[in-house]
Image: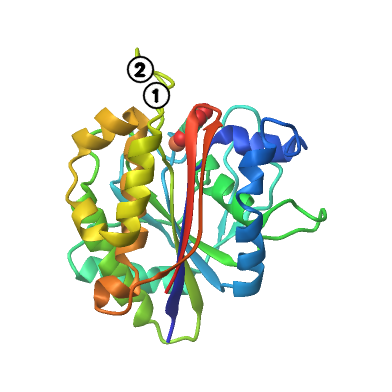
């Protein structure tokens, strides 16, 4: 049986990918950001997941205003790296897990969640930056990502976006789907995006440390209560792009305690401002 062993949560920022790709991680500005992920990289090497179910958002690279799926599951064998305007990042393509992804699609759609099935999809910084942060520098040219990835794209760009409650319920259904897959796989689920940031308009540059840290506290200890928070609170308190944080509730909803099991163990927690225009938050919860 496949099992979820841990959830990881992390911000994404394109400039983090650029800092890694251009060898700037030891510069004074970036060093504290990457220091917050050293323990996570060691942890991930020890955990050796077979598959990471990676909840993220596309930024008008795979999708656009022409086509806006609320929830899209990648069922492909491979995902190319998106060209976001300055060429694709120099990281390897992402290997999928079509069998598990198809099983999850089957199970979750049967439970009345409308997923879009995607067989061809370039992945942008929303997915590759969390991978780079968690996996570390590429040690060699023949580097490959050390696990398969099921990309799960959530619309948090064009309103209406899904509610926290729906994301949380979806996480529960994803857990049931993964646990009913008849192969012994170590699966992690990652929630990515956030924390507070606003990239445009009069409030551009908004950061809210207090709110972000309260969000981390509640994500750990009161996820069901947090899931009831309306969109307007994210936008008011964490900025227009802070709404990316609803995606974290999908990963949190997939954890054992939500299904009646024991509370997760907080393995690592990190918060740092700034990285580009964004507050970086990071959490690892073990089941
Ligand atoms: C930044 C953050 C994002 O989440 C994003 O998608 C693009 C840019 C930033 O802080 O620069
Ligand atoms: Fe983003």
| View extreme (front): residue | 210
Query: Distance between the Cα atoms at labels 2 and 1?
Result: 6 Å
**Residue 115 visible (yes or no):** yes
User: Quick one: 150 or 166, which is closer to the camera?
Assistant: 166
Q: Which residue, given by chain and number where applicable, does mark 2 sit on? A: 203
Indicate which quadrant contains ligand 2. Answer: top left
User: Quick one: 266 or 192, which is closer to the camera?
Assistant: 266
> What is the x, y in percent for residue 130?
55, 49
Q: Residue at x 66, y 55 (%)?
A: 38
| View extreme (right): residue | 140
- Above or below 11: residue 186: below
Please give the label number shown on residue 206: 1
Question: Is residue 81 left or right of 100 when viewed as pictured?
Answer: right
> What is the x, y in percent for residue 222?
25, 59
Q: Secondary structure at mark 1?
A: loop
Q: Secondary structure at mark 2?
A: loop
User: Quick one: 186 or 36, which is closer to the camera?
Assistant: 36
Figure quadrant of residue 197: top left
Q: Residue at x 33, y 33 (%)?
A: 238
Q: Are marks 2 and 1 in contact (CB under 8 Å)?
A: yes
Q: For the residue carrying disc 2, how many other residues have a C-alpha within 10 Å: few (<14), some (14-19), or many (20+)?
A: few
Quarter of the image with the N terminus in it: bottom left
Quarter of the image with the C terminus in it: bottom left
């Amino acid at each position: 049986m496949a099992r979820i062993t841990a959830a990881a949560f992390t911000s994404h920022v394109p400039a983090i990918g650029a800092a890694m790709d251009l060898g700037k991680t030891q510069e004074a500005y970036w060093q504290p950001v990457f220091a917050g992920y050293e323990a996570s990289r060691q942890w991930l090497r020890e955990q050796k997941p077979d598959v990471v179910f990676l909840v993220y958002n596309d930024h008008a690279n795979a999708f656009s205003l022409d086509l806006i799926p609320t929830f899209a599951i990648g069922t492909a064998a491979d995902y190319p790296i998106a060209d976001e305007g300055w060429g694709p990042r120099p990281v390897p393509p992402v290997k999928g897990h079509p069998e598990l992804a198809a099983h999850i699609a089957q199970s979750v759609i049967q439970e009345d969640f409308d997923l879009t099935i995607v067989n061809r999809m370039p992945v942008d910084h929303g997915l590759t930056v969390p991978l780079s942060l968690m996996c570390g520098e590429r040690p060699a040219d023949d580097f490959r990502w050390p696990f398969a990835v099921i990309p799960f794209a959530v619309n948090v760009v064009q309103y209406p976006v899904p509610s926290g409650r729906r994301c949380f319920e979806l996480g529960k259904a994803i857990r049931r789907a993964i646990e009913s897959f008849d192969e012994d796989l170590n699966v992690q689920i990652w929630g990515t995006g956030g924390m507070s940031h606003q990239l445009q308009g009069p409030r551009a540059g908004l950061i809210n440390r207090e709110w972000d840290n309260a969000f981390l506290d509640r994500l750990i200890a009161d996820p069901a209560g947090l899931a009831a928070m309306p969109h307007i609170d994210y936008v008011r308190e964490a900025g227009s792009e802070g709404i990316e944080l609803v995606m974290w509730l999908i990963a949190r909803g997939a954890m054992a305690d939500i299904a009646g099991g024991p509370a997760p163990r907080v393995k690592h927690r990190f918060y740092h401002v700034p990285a580009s225009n964004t507050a970086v938050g990071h959490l690892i919860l073990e089941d």
